[in-house]
Amino acid sequence: MKLGRKKAAQGRQPRWRQGNDAVGATYRGSNRDDRDIPVDRQPRQRGAAAAASAQAKASRMWRFWLQRTGLLILLVALVISVCNVLSLSTNAEIKPVTQSGSGSFLRSQATYQSAADKLLAASIWNRNKITIDTAVFNRNMMAQFPELASVSVSLPLLAHRPVVYIQPSKATAVLNAANGSFVIDDNGKALLPSAQLPSAGQLPQITDQSGLHVELNHQVLTADDVNFIQTVLAELSAKHIGVSSLVLPASSRELDVYIAGQPYYVKFNLQSGDARQQAGTFLAALSQLQKQHVTPPHYVDVRVDGRAYYQ
């Protein structure tokens, strides 16, 4: 009996174990199925993450190049704006400058305008506010038009048309030299041939007897000599004494002033430089001679300070 129970017990035990094994197998199979689910989903999740990463990277690259493109466009626009501001036109604006006591222009404004435009168009460097050489432009204008006392170029800040200011020299007298007659200014510079100035006949006429050869835009008389002559003429004009002509002898630093309607002339000394005193000496001597009813037949000499001689 005992043996049979043991056998029976032993016989059921495998079934129990087998059942347990079956249950365990089923349980373990269920666990394997559960573990397989995430394994099957990992490739899809990795693919989605890679796609999202690639899309984010592409978006960042797009924003990067978009920012750089905008900056490049802004830079190009800035360069174009700067080039536009710095550009210069070859059509200059001429502005005459006249001051009290200054002379009038000896040529028309259109003549100066045409010359300025040609000088600006002659070089590509003149079309930019940075590269233009205004000093060279001024010298070329002065060389072409000796009658101008000064030339200056003003470059506008935003506009493109350069402004050229020109100031005329004062036509003082006509110098008759060995090679022709020329208009001179206050500084003794030869401006232009007298034939080109319609009003040249109204200017004082100075005859040079030294054989001087005059060149335009060059000094032919010193500024002191011109000032001396102007002072003498002003002093005589104040006493209503007319002058027919002035002569510069070749032998010495002398100025001979021929009195209109009289047989004599007056000798002045250019070397002393005191024109007012010499003119005063002559006027005093002339007054004394008129009281005596004496007319000098040849000349009155006032080259010595404070003294007058006549012959």
Image: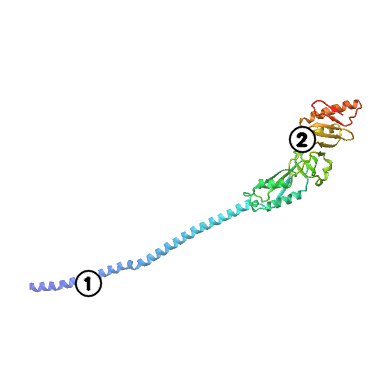
Instruction: Report whether 202 appears left or right of 36.
Output: right
Residue at x-position 36% and y-position 67%: 43
Looking at the picture, tell me which residue is in the foreground, 133 or 9. Answer: 133
x, y percent for residue 229: 79, 35
Locate the C terminus and report the quarter of the image it occupies.
Answer: top right
Q: In percent of the image, x 82 and y 46: which residue is there?
A: 195
Q: Earlier in the sequence, mark 1 or mark 2?
A: 1
Q: Is residue 17 left or right of residue 279?
A: left
> Would you place residue 243 above or below residue 193 in this image?
above
Q: Is residue 202 above or below residue 5?
A: above
Q: Position of residue 163 (x, y in %)?
A: 69, 47
Find numbered disc 2 in the image and state the secondary structure of the residue it sits on. helix
Q: Which mark is residue 225?
A: 2
Circle 1 SS class: helix
Residue at 17%, 73% in the rendered image: 15
Amino acid at dot 1: Ala
Horizontal relation, residue 241 to residue 215: left or right = right
Q: Which is more foreground, mark 1 or mark 2?
A: 2
State how far apart marks 1 and 2 are (Cα): 141 Å
Q: How many marks?
A: 2
Instruction: Return the x and y of residue 60 as percentages of the image width and height.
Output: 46, 59
Looking at the rendered structure, the kind of residue marked 2 is: Asp
Q: Who is closer to the viewer here, 159 or 96?
A: 96
Q: What residue does disc 1 label?
A: 22
Q: Residues within 10 Å of mark 2 (few under 14, many from 20)?
A: some
Task: Name the residue: 60% across, 55% down.
Answer: 80
- Answer with the quarter of the image where residue 177 lies: top right
Decide: few, some or many residues near mark 1? Use Cα within 10 Å; few <14, some 14-19, many ≥20.
few
